[in-house]
Amino acid sequence: MPQFLTDDDVTLVYDDLGPRDGAPVVLCHGLAAAGEQLAADAAFFARRGYRVLVPDVRGHGRSGKPNPMTAEGFGIPRMANDLVAMLDHAEAGPVHWVGNSLGGILALELLARHEARLQTLATFGTAYALSLPRWGAQVIPWTYAVFGRKLYAWMAARGMTRHAAARLLIAGMVERFDPQVGLLAAHNLTRYDLIANALAARLPILILRGGRDPQVNVVLGPTLRAMRGRPNFTLVEVPEGGHCANLDATEQVRMELLRFWQRAARS
């Protein structure tokens, strides 16, 4: 379980699986989740010879929080910089990046300044731009307070997936999550536009669109209108995938990623 201190003294923890000389992969979770969301996928790819890095983003899972906690401390550039530092700490060459929701947003931020650190980019549950009222972030601590951690976590899990095992995993992560982190991070995540970064990028880009992820799909239009037709962009439909498509349509997501990386290696 490698860990290091960021330049603002936050402990960042990540897992490092598979052979050190394997093609490097980053699997990065979404808001209110943790690396455990992707642990089974990490083991799967490691068994196939990939070196897999699985971070817990600051304020999530085993990683620490800044002191004091501010919205700036959970800004998109700040969290993305942490993950560049992780690549440095792991001495990892250009990586195949797979991001769910927040994990995809952070990779899109990296494209502007660190595209060379990525071989490919695959996202699911991620819109490349979003414009929502910032007051919506206030709902996160309110819901924890009104419903209690356990009930709210179970409600959130039921809203994300129909699968019992996936619900248990999601509910556990949401229950342990600090709602104050959610409030501060969501303040930044309600309004961003990273489409220009994707348009300027030359690396292969894949979107896995979950058929059972209506909240993201309803705001995905600007992303798809901008990216369709670009030679380095691929859209794959995952009909049974929810917001955490790796937990709902596991086999399809894994096979699509393997095919994507293999095509990129041949090009």
Image (cartoon, rainbow, N blue to C red):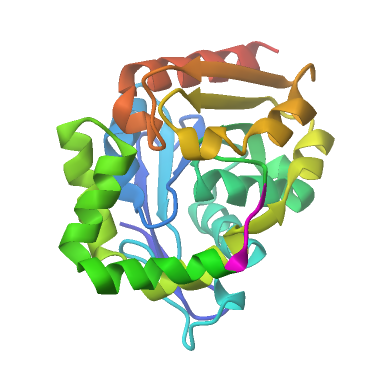
The reply to whether the magenta stretch includes residue 131 is yes
Residue visible at 55% across and 32% down? 217
Left or right: residue 204 compared with residue 161: right
The answer to which of 125 and 89 lies nearer the viewer is 125
Which quadrant would residue 222 be assigned to in this image?
A: top right
Q: Is residue 26 visible?
A: yes
Q: Is residue 4 visible?
A: no
Left or right: residue 101 compared with residue 119: left
Residue visible at 24% across and 64% down? 176
The reply to whether the magenta stretch includes residue 102 is no
Percent x, y of residue 125: 50, 37
Which quadrant would residue 14 be assigned to in this image?
A: bottom left
Percent x, y of residue 225: 76, 27
Magenta segment boundaries in residue numbering:
130-134
Above or below residue 124? Residue 106 is below
Residue visible at 39% across and 25% down? 241
Residue visible at 65% across and 18% down? 234
Left or right: residue 18 compared with residue 4: left
Above or below residue 4? Residue 211 is above
Percent x, y of residue 261: 55, 20
Quadrant showing the N terminus: bottom left
The answer to which of 241 and 145 lies nearer the viewer is 145
Quadrant showing the C terminus: top right
* Figure disc tally: 0
Above or below residue 178? Residue 254 is above
The answer to which of 140 and 6 lies nearer the viewer is 140
Which residue is most to the bottom?
A: 68
Percent x, y of residue 108: 67, 45
